[in-house]
Image (cartoon, rainbow, N blue to C red):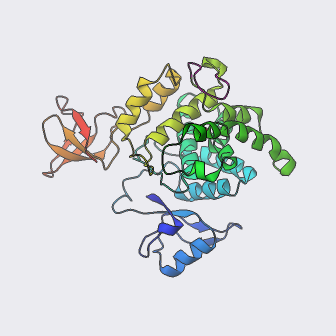
């Protein structure tokens, strides 16, 4: 599925999750085909967008967290409803813990518009998977999830033309953008006076520190190594991975195998090596549906991943023949084609 902003919806598209109003009443059911009337209602009710099915992706995307939960989180983030985000962050942990498999198969779920919200939810899901891989207990996972969902909440205090600029930022704009961890911390601190429940100190710390680098070159404090809270180190890796694999107006999306290379190349400098090593156990470098070129010169599409050896999936060749790379150890994947 794909997140499509309200202004880009077209009649005929099919939504992939139920759509709720503010009172949790169902407005539109999953699998509804959109008409002009529904599209008008969706924009009148100020939804910024919805998840829709794309051709043949129904079987492709293994759902670790439902579109419905993702949509709810996006809408609560957009409304800056911090209390509701805290509850949803805990729901996300439960959904992930009850998922049969935690292998991340998706190419990219981000879109140009509403990028910050969709990205925040992606980062949350990825962070919790890393947290599970690192053996965190449930209460810790909940706090990690809260911090990950709220990590960029401070961007709402950065001018919109900077946050949504469809091009690279100038150095002045970048300096302003770099203040968002501080703004985020302030929002979470001030929230209490606006009726938000007290947010755990660890959550605030992680939001404030999610752009710190392992070697001390990050911001805002230039902290080093384990002086950076583990949750911030996890969110940092998930954040950069999701940003790399997202298509933005000014850049193409990296494919997962290139993004994995980037994380590995920068572990020990930008990133905590243990966090990166845990993450890559869950990342399919060749997600189901991607087209690949093999060392034999043949081309094909990945149809199934081997959870233990993610670099050796099953591939359907253009000739229709299926090869299991676990049984053809002399064949390697040279590159992703799409
Ligand atoms: Fe950030």
- Expressed as whole percent of the image width and height from the top left, the position of residue 265 reads 41, 24
Residue 19 part of the magenta-drawn span: no
Left or right of 83 on screen, residue 54: left
Please tell me whether the stretch drawn in magenta is mainly helix, strand or loop: loop
Residue 131 is at least partly visible in this image: no
Left or right of 170 on screen, residue 293: left
Q: At 18% from the left edge and 38% from the top edge, which residue is drawn?
A: 294
Q: At 66% from the left edge and 51% from the top edge, which residue is drawn?
A: 88
Choose between 250 and 337: the one closer to the eye. Answer: 250
Residue 247 is at least partly visible in this image: yes
- Farthest right residue? 193
Q: At 35% from the left edge and 44% from the top edge, which residue is drawn?
A: 287
Write the start and end of the magenta stretch as one range. Answer: 214-222
- Farthest bottom residue? 37
- Expressed as whole percent of the image width and height from the top left, the position of residue 322 reads 18, 46
- Expressed as whole percent of the image width and height from the top left, the position of residue 314 reads 25, 42
Displayed quadrant of residue 70: bottom right
Q: Is residue 102 above or below residue 46?
A: above
Choose between 173 and 21: the one closer to the eye. Answer: 173
Q: At 56% from the left edge and 36% from the top edge, which residue is drawn?
A: 171
Choose between 178 and 81: the one closer to the eye. Answer: 178
Residue 216 part of the magenta-drawn span: yes
Number of numbered discs on residues: 0
Q: Is residue 41 above or below residue 135?
A: below
- Expressed as whole percent of the image width and height from the top left, the position of residue 204 reads 73, 35
Displayed quadrant of residue 93: top right
Left or right of 207 on screen, residue 264: left
- In the rendered image, the quadrant that contains the N terminus is bottom left
């Amino acid at each position: 599925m794909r997140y499509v902003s309200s202004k880009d919806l077209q009649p005929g598209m099919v939504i992939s999750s139920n759509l709720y109003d503010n009172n949790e009443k169902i407005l539109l059911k999953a699998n509804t085909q959109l008409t002009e009337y529904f599209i008008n209602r969706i924009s009148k009710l100020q939804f910024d967008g919805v998840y829709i099915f794309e051709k043949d992706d129904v079987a492709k995307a293994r759902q670790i967290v439902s579109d419905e939960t993702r949509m709810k989180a996006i809408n609560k983030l957009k409304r800056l409803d911090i209390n509701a985000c805290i509850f949803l962050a805990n729901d996300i942990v439960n959904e992930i813990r009850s998922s049969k498999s935690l292998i991340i198969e998706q190419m990219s779920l981000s879109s140009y518009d509403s990028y910050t919200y969709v990205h925040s939810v992606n980062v949350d899901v990825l962070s919790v998977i890393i947290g599970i891989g690192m053996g965190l207990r449930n209460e810790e996972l909940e706090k990690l999830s809260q911090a990950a969902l709220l990590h960029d909440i401070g961007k709402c205090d950065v001018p919109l033309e900077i946050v949504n600029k469809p091009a690279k930022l100038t150095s002045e704009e970048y300096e302003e953008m770099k203040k968002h961890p501080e703004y985020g911390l302030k929002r979470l601190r001030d929230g209490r006076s606006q009726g938000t429940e007290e947010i755990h100190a660890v959550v605030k710390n992680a939001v404030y520190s999610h752009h710190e680098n392992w070697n001390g070159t990050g911001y805002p404090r230039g902290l080093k190594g384990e002086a950076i809270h583990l949750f911030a180190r996890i969110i940092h890796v998930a954040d950069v991975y999701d940003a790399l694999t997202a298509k933005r107006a000014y850049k193409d999306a990296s494919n997962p195998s290139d993004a994995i290379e980037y994380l590995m190349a920068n572990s020990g400098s930008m990133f905590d090596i243990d966090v990166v090593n845990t993450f890559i156990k869950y990342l399919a470098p060749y997600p189901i549906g991607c087209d690949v070129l093999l060392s034999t010169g043949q081309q094909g599409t990945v149809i199934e991943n081997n959870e233990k050896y993610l670099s050796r999936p099953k591939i359907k060749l253009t000739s229709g023949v299926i090869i299991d790379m676990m049984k053809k150890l002399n064949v390697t994947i040279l590159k992703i084609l799409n």
